Every structure is written in C-alpha cells, then in structure tokens.
Amino acid sequence: MLIELKDVNKTYDNGQPLHVLKGINLSIDSGEFVSIMGASGSGKSTLLNIIGILDNYDTGEYYIDGRLIKGLSEKQAADYRNRMIGFIFQSFNLISFKTAVENVELPLFYQGVSRSKRHELAMQYLEKLGLADWAGHYPNEMSGGQKQRVAIARALITNPKILLADEPTGALDSKTSEEVMQLLAKLNREEGVTIIVVTHESGVANCTDKIVHIKDGLIGRIEDNREHRASMFGANTIMK
Amino acid sequence: MRFDLDTYREIADSLVRNKSRSLLTGFGVFWGVFMLLFLLGGGQGLRQLMSNNFAGFATNTAVIAPSQTTKPWKGMKEGRRWSLTYTDVERLKRMIPELETVTPMVSNWGQEAVNGANTVNANIKGVYADYSKVEEPLIRYGRYINEADVAQERKVCVIGKRIYTSLFPSGGDPCGTMIKVGPVYYQVIGVDFNSGNMSINGNADEAVVVPLPVAQKIYHRGNTIDLLCTCGRSGVKMSSLEDRMRHIIAREHGFDPTDRDATFFLNTEQIFAIMDNLFTGLSFLIWLVGLGTILAGIIGVSNIMMVTVKERTTEIGIRRAIGATPSNILGQIIMESISLTMAAGSFGIVFAVLLLSLLGSIVNGRPDAVPVDFQVSFWTAVVSALLLSILGVIAGLAPASRAMAIKPVDAMRDE
C-alpha cells in the first residue's frame, strides 16, 4: 500500500472543539486514480491536508510507502512534501510574478538542483504538457486551462509518489475541466502516477477509477468506478 | 542559505516590483546614513577649522594683564588702577620655577604703516625674543626678533601677513625694506604668516613686531608693561599656578590677593577645555541625531517588510507547500531586508562622501586656507556599512518570524 490511514482523528479547537475526522481508515495503492467526494464540511479538505502533510492529525497512524508520518519537524515535513507529493490547487496557486517555466522550476530550486538542470527539466515537463511556447509567459497572460497545466507540470517535476489535486477543475469551465481530467487520467494510465482528486462534482469523480465518499468525518461508500458509470448524468461529460 | 543566482534575482525582483515603496523606504535609511556620515565629517572639519585658529599657540600659556581693583586694601580704596612693571618679569621667574617662560609685551594700537603709496592700519607689539615660545611665528621670509635686536635696540620689525600683503602687493621678499610705522622707520627683517585667530593683543596678521625696548622708548612707556605672557614647563598646569602668581603680583602692587578682578588672567588651558567640551557635546549630538535617523529608517524598513509579508501570505504558503523549509523563507525575507538597507545605505555613504569632498574643496579652495580634512575615514565607511547589514538583519527579524508562522494550508484557502 502506498498510502495507509489507520483510525485518523482530527479535531479543530477554535474556541469550540470541532471533531472533523472521526476515525478515517483508508488505503490507496500505488498507481490508483482515486477521487474523494463529499459535501462541504464533510472533512474532505482536512483529509487532503493530512495526506499532503500540510496539516497534523491528533490520533491514529498515517503511512506513506510504509513510512510513518507523525510529529515531523517543519523541515522534514517540507522535505517530504517536496519529494513525495505534488500539489494541484483549485486556484492554480502559481506565483504571479514568475513565468511559467520559473514556476515549474520552483520545487527543484528548494531541492537545491542546479540552475541549468532545473531549467532543462522544467522545459521538458512544459513540453510534455504542450506549453513549451508559453514558458516565458506570466500566469496572468494565460488561460485557466493553461495555468492548471503549468501547475500540473510543477507538481510532476519532482517525480512525486502522489499527485494531490484539490478541486482541480473548480475554477475552470466544463470543456477545460474535461481536458484537465483527461490529462490526469492519461498521466495515471501512461505513467502510473498515483492521483488523488478531492472534489464535490460527480462528473469529475466519474473520471476516476475509485470514488471514496466521505460524510461527516467518516468514510462512507468506496465505489469501484473502472467502468466510469458513477455519474447519473451520463458518462462522458462534466456538468457545470 | 544556498548561493544561487535565482536567490538574488528573486530579491531584486521583489524589491523592484514595488519601486516607489522600496524607494521611499530606502530613503529613510539613505538619509540616516547620509546625515550621520555628513555630520561626522562636517564636525571633524569644523573642529580642525577651530583648532587652526589656535595654531602655533602654546597650550599651557597664561596671560596676565592689570585691571582695576575691586576691593579696598590696606587703607586704599577700591577702583584703583595699577600697572605691571619689568620687575614683575624677574620676580615671577624667580619665585615660580615651574614657569619656563615669562615675557613682557608693550603695544600700541592703531598705527599707520606706510610703504611708498601703500598704507595699512597696524598694531605695534614690542616683545623680547623669547616671545616666540608663547606664540610661535610661522616665518615666511627672513627671521624673527632675536636677542641682539633687543640688546642693541635695533629699529627692525617682523610684519604680519595682512601688513605684508597690503604694503607689498607685488609680493616678493620684503626683508631689508624700510617701512614707516607711526612716526618711525623700521627695517623689515621678517614676515610672520601665522594666521591663527587666537592672539595676544590683537591678531598676528595685523601686527608689526618690534624689539621691546624700541617700542618702550618711542612710545614713552617708562617702566610699565601691558601684559605678561607666561608658559609653564611641560606637564605643568597653568591653573594650578594661577593663585600663586596672583599673590606675588598682589603683594608687589598693593592690592588684595583675593581680589580676583584686579588682574585679568587668561589661561589658554581653559579655552582649550571649553573647546573640547563643545566638541564632545557636538559629537554626542551628531551621533544622537545620526543614529536616531538611521533607526527611524530601519524601523521603516521593518514596517514595510511586515506589510510585504502580509501581502505575500499566499505566495509564502505556496512555497511552503511545494517544499520550502521555514529557514528558506526566513533567509529570503532577511536577505530582502538586508539588500534594501544596504543598497539605500551605500547610496547614503557615497552621497555623504561626495558632498563632504565638495565641501572640502570649497573650504580649502579659498586662497588663504589652511587645509582642513572634512572626509570621513575609510574605516568609518566600512564600519557604517557593517552596521547597516546588522541593522538590516534586525529589521528583517520581526517580518521574517511572521513569515515563518505562515502555514502551507493558508495557500489552499481561496482568497
């Protein structure tokens, strides 16, 4: 198992204790394409933050590739995030004053890769995503789909074990959403990247192979969706 | 902190992105450094200008001149006038062995010196040869009054700089020329270029110095002298001798030894002390103002970095999410702070040095200027640059710690 969560609990304590995750048990194998679905407030974002080592959990155990992720120092956590996890965000979260290629280079910068090497690698990944011509452009000169593809390139450049996508299509129109999901599916199929997508859109979830439903801080149904028939609104479209 | 070209590009980028903000913030630091260095250099120049005024003047000199008594003494009323005489010279020499030189002076003010068609106002000073130990002449041509001049009562004179330039407008060595001062012709034997402004009985510039017996006889001075100049041996404080001198003179001339106003007693030591105090106070003020201004500038930098960090919360969150360690972020913010401080401060140093050299060339450019050094030393500049980088770090500390507190989760939140 690549990812293993055992009875993970998380309580936020902002004046009033809020028990968000109430004992999550989840296993995800290497090469899977999983979506986590749930309504807002269900705890899906918190779960993603914990999987992405962006947040701590209170009790339970979380393993990546057999390594226990608990009580890490900030420096260690940063290092694990950098080497094991690639992030894709709803609002792209590109750095606005850096060009596409500079954004893609950034994770390697923090790994201490030399300037020419990381530039070369970043160009390779941009080319792979069909954005080589846009390398010198700033995020505000690009469309939403292009921005998300730059973000995907940035997430992939460290060759991570897991690709975490938080509402990756949330800021895109249906056509672009479709394209981005196709791209993720292709990456999963052809390169064997493990992808976890958090979403509340059934159409997006339908593109994935396995749908994990989360409700009130607990894992509900886990749906096998290799046939891509989960969406009640037909198979091949994302409804907006 | 790794040294990567991109680290510097990033710093430059983020400073340039907010041009006017960086400029205005930097100006505070620039102005502080400029003020401190400029005031330091200016203060040093001023001090030198002032000490030039005392140039050639022995530091342990006391001048005694008679005045009116203010206390009754042995049946005599107050308000009595008295005079110093030649016997006082020998008496002081003998009774106070700590004195190296005791030399009298007679003078006559407001004489007209004439050489051909040129005339100028001059003061006659009659001195012995050893007067040169009190007020060291800066002989440009010829020589000073010597023992033989005094013994033979030669009608010779040493003229001050202004007398020389007025009477001999074409320049050249005037020695041997006869000039008329008051009713008498004197042969010029020397030119004294001492331009110090501290002089006894009028400025050395406007003096015609003659052997004392000559002045005494020409101006019918009899036994009286105008003042006594005394120099202590090295290491002797004139202020410690003041009371003894007063007593000796009071007993001889019949006035109350406690009557301080009966003698005019000028001690150069006091004047130097006053000047020293003045400049100590001045440099304290300079440091206070200069450091205060720099500090205000640094607080400005710190403040603006706070704002920057706040604005860049998302960006910092993204960086943390994709693998920046807290020390990466700390380094970035502190480097930005240092860069801004150093860049602005360097301009301040350069500008201060330029302006000081301009000031120096203006002051030293005057025709009769004694060279004055306004420039701050190389090491002062180096130390201030070091100080700036330290202050830069300090300015960056608070914003950097705030930046470090930003959690990567913050990047995920939609703004």
Image (tube, grey):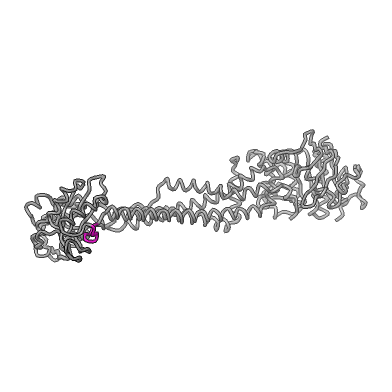
Answer whether residue B161 is visible to the viewer in this image.
no
Residue drawn at (90%, 45%) of the image: A220
Residue placed most toward the observer, A182 or B345: B345
* Side of A28 where B267 appears, left or right: left
Residue placed most toward the observer, A134 or A160: A160
The residue sitting at the left extreme is: B152
* Side of A209 where B96 appears, left or right: left
Image position, residue A20 (x, y; %): 83, 48
Residue drawn at (8%, 51%) of the image: B151
Answer whether residue B93 is visible to the viewer in this image.
yes
User: Does the magenta segment cover residue B263?
Assistant: yes
Quarter of the picture containing the N terminus of chain A is top right
Image position, residue A132 (x, y; %): 71, 46
The residue sitting at the top extreme is: A66
Residue placed most toward the observer, B166 or B253: B253
Image position, residue B229 (x, y; %): 19, 54
Quarter of the picture containing the C terminus of chain A is bottom right
Image position, residue B277 (x, y; %): 36, 54
Residue drawn at (41%, 46%) of the image: B378
B199 over B392 or under it: above or below: below
- Numbered-mark total: 0
Question: What span is in magenta?
Answer: B258-265
User: Does the magenta segment cover residue B154?
Assistant: no
Instruction: Give the quarter of the image for residue B65.
Output: bottom left
* Side of B62 where A65 appears, left or right: right
* Side of B14 where B205 appears, left or right: left
